[in-house]
C-alpha cells in the first residue's frame, strides 16, 4: 500500500522541539541540579533512540511509501507526532516549578504513549496497523523511561 | 485511513453537547470524590468536605471544561478555524472519556481496597485526555500542527491550574 503522509507534516521542517522535550522531562526527573543536567542528556539520547526505533518500525511497515516519498518524510511524520510531547512537557515543568509536584515521570510516560499513537496516525498510509504498532512501541519506550527514571531517583539518588 | 480528526468528527455527529458534558462532568466528579476520600482517610477532611469536593468536581467537569472548549473555539477562530462553538465544547468534553474510565476504576480500588487513588488514577486519567484534546484541536485549526500544539498546551495549563486551585479549596 502506497499510503500518504499528511500535507501539514510534509510542509513542516523537522524542528527538534520534541528532543528538547525529552531533555526537559529527563532533567525534571532529577531531584538535584547536577543530576538534572545528566538526566537531561540521558533523556535526550533516549528520546532520540525511541523516535528512531518507532521511525524504523513505521518505515518497515510502509516500504512502498518509503521508496516513493523518501525515508525523511517518515522521520518528519514521527517528529510531528512527537510534538504532542510539548503540552505534557510544559505541564510537567509548571507542575514542578509552580505547584511543587514531583510528577515528571508520570507526565513523560503519558506523553510518550500519546505521541506514539499520534506518530502512527501521522504516517497513516491507510493502515490502522501503523497506529497500533507505533502505540505498542511507545508503550515499551514509556516503560523503559519509567524504569530508568525510577532507578535514577532510587538507586542513583540523582 | 486512521485519522483521529475524522474519527472524532464522525463520533461527534450524533452526540448532543449536554450529553458530552456529562462525560467530563462525571469524570471530574469521581476524581474529586477520590481526592476527598483520600483526605478523609488521612483524617484531613470531614464528610462535608468530601461532599464539597464532589460538588466542585461536578461544576468543574461541566461548566469549567465547557469554558475551556469555548476558549479553544475562540482561539481556533482567530487561527482560521471553521468549527462551531458547540462542536468544540463536545470535542473537549468527550476528550475526557479516558479520564472517566480511570476515575471509575480508581473509585473501585478506593472503595473496596482502601487505596489512595486520586493521584495514581486521577492525574493519569487527566493526562490521558491531552492526546484526544490535541487531535480535536488539530481538527479545529484545519490540521495545522503548530497551532494545535500551542492550543492544546493552553487548554492543558487551564485545566491543571484550575484543578490545583479547586483542589486546595476542598
Image (tube, grey):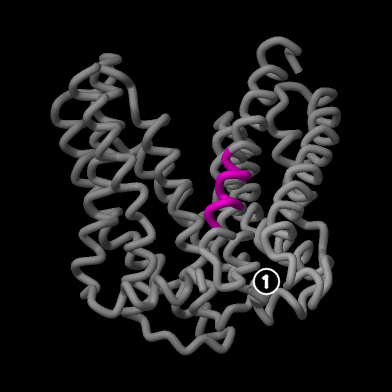
In the rendered image, residue B93, in percent from the top left (x then y), is placed at 33, 63
Q: Is residue A98 visible?
A: no
In the rendered image, the quadrant that contains the N terminus of chain A is bottom right
**Magenta-tinted stretch:** A131-139
Q: Residue at x 19, y 20 (%)?
A: B112
In the rendered image, residue A18, in percent from the top left (x then y), is placed at 74, 54
In the rendered image, residue A29, in percent from the top left (x then y), is placed at 68, 29
Q: Main secondary structure of the magenta part?
A: helix
Q: Tag 1: Cα neighbours inside 10 Å, few (<14), some, or many (≥20)?
A: some
Residue found farthest to the top:
A155
Q: Residue at x 24, y 41 (%)?
A: B30
Seen in the picture, residue B41 relative to B125 is either above or below; the reply is above
**Which chain letter goes with mark 1?**
B
Closer to us: A42 or A100: A42
Q: Which residue is under mark 1?
A: B146
A66 magenta-colored: no
Q: Is residue A116 visible?
A: yes
Q: Residue at x 65, y 43 (%)?
A: A93
Q: Residue at x 78, y 69 (%)?
A: A66
In the rendered image, the quadrant that contains the C terminus of chain A is top right
**Mark 1, secondary structure of its residue:** helix
In the rendered image, residue A114, in percent from the top left (x then y), is placed at 55, 52
Amino acid at each position: 500500500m502506497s499510503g500518504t503522509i499528511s500535507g501539514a507534516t510534509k510542509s513542516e521542517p523537522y524542528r527538534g522541539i520534541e528532543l528538547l522535550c525529552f531533555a526537559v522531562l529527563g532533567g525534571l526527573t532529577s531531584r538535584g541540579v547536577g543530576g538534572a543536567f545528566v538526566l537531561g542528556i540521558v533523556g535526550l539520547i533516549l528520546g532520540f533512540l525511541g523516535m528512531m526505533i518507532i521511525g524504523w518500525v513505521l518505515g518497515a511497515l510502509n516500504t512502498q511509501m518509503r521508496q516513493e516519498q523518501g525515508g525523511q518524510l517518515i522521520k518528519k511524520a514521527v517528529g510531528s507526532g512527537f510534538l504532542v510531547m510539548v503540552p505534557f512537557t510544559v505541564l510537567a515543568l509548571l507542575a514542578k516549578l509552580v505547584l511543587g509536584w514531583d510528577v515528571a515521570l508520570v507526565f513523560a510516560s503519558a506523553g510518550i504513549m500519546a505521541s506514539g499513537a499520534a506518530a502512527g496516525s501521522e504516517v497513516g498510509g491507510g493502515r490502522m496497523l501503523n497506529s497500533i504498532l507505533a502505540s505498542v512501541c511507545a508503550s515499551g519506550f514509556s516503560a523503559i523511561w519509567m524504569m530508568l527514571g525510577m532507578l535514577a531517583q532510587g538507586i542513583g539518588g540523582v | 485511513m486512521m485519522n483521529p480528526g475524522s474519527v472524532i468528527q464522525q463520533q461527534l455527529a450524533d452526540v448532543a453537547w449536554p450529553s458530552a458534558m456529562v462525560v467530563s462532568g462525571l469524570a471530574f466528579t469521581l476524581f474529586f470524590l477520590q481526592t476527598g476520600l483520600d483526605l478523609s482517610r488521612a483524617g484531613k477532611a470531614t464528610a462535608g468536605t468530601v461532599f464539597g469536593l464532589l460538588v466542585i468536581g461536578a461544576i468543574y467537569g461541566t461548566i469549567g471544561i465547557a469554558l475551556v472548549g469555548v476558549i479553544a473555539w475562540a482561539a481556533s477562530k482567530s487561527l482560521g478555524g471553521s468549527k462551531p462553538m458547540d462542536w468544540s465544547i463536545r470535542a473537549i468534553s468527550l476528550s475526557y472519556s479516558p479520564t472517566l474510565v480511570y476515575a471509575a476504576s480508581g473509585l473501585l480500588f478506593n472503595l473496596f481496597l482502601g487505596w489512595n487513588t486520586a493521584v495514581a488514577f486521577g492525574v493519569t486519567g487527566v493526562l490521558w485526555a491531552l492526546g484526544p484534546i490535541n487531535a480535536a484541536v488539530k481538527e479545529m485549526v484545519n490540521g495545522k500542527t503548530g497551532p494545535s500544539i500551542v492550543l492544546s498546551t493552553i487548554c492543558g495549563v487551564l485545566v491543571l491550574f484550575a484543578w490545583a486551585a479547586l483542589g486546595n479549596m476542598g
